[in-house]
Image (cartoon, rainbow, N blue to C red):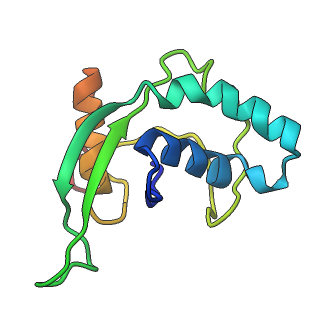
Amino acid sequence: LLSGMVDPGEHVSETLRREFMEEALDSGALGSKDKYRIEEKLKDFFNSGKEIYKGYVDDPRNTDNAWMETVAFLFHDEDGNKIGQFNLKAGDDAKALQWMDIDERLNLYASHKKFLMLAAKRLGAHWRKVQSE
């Protein structure tokens, strides 16, 4: 799950590509040639996203006078040869980073679990319900 604030004049796909490079590939440590080469590889992938949610979200920062709204996109790498080809390396403000299987037991911030459930539904994937112990 990747998130970031959209800069003025920036399209969401550009924001997500930038955030992925900063947080998942530690682009700050790359040379300009490597950074450009990777950006070009990612451009088509991040232009192919499907919007799965847009609007108000529950968030602890919400107040009566101000609230969070978001847009969630689904980017899917079916065979792992687009995004899956990259070795993840935490950068910027990312702490722990890994590819992982997901289910409802995940403890995620705010509405993020809802977005994952919507993505699974859109892909026709199984969202595993876990029995209470």
Report x, y in % for residue 81.
Answer: 63, 18
Q: Is residue 82 above or below residue 128?
A: above
Direction from residue 71 to residue 46 in the image, left or right: right
Determine which quarter of the picture holds residue 38: top right
Which residue occupies the extreme bottom position in the image? 64
Q: Is residue 4 above or below residue 88?
A: below
Q: Is residue 68 above or below residue 114?
A: below
Direction from residue 7 to residue 93 in the image, left or right: right
Residue under the image location 66 percent in, 53 percent down: 22
Residue 128 appears in the rendering? no
Which residue occupies the extreme left position in the image? 64
Q: Is residue 63 above or below residue 24?
A: below
* Of 53 and 1, the residue lying toward us: 53
Direction from residue 95 to residue 132 in the image, left or right: left
Residue under the image location 28 percent in, 46 percent down: 115
* Of 55 and 90, the residue lying toward us: 55
* Of 103 and 86, the residue lying toward us: 86
Determine which quarter of the picture holds residue 79: top right
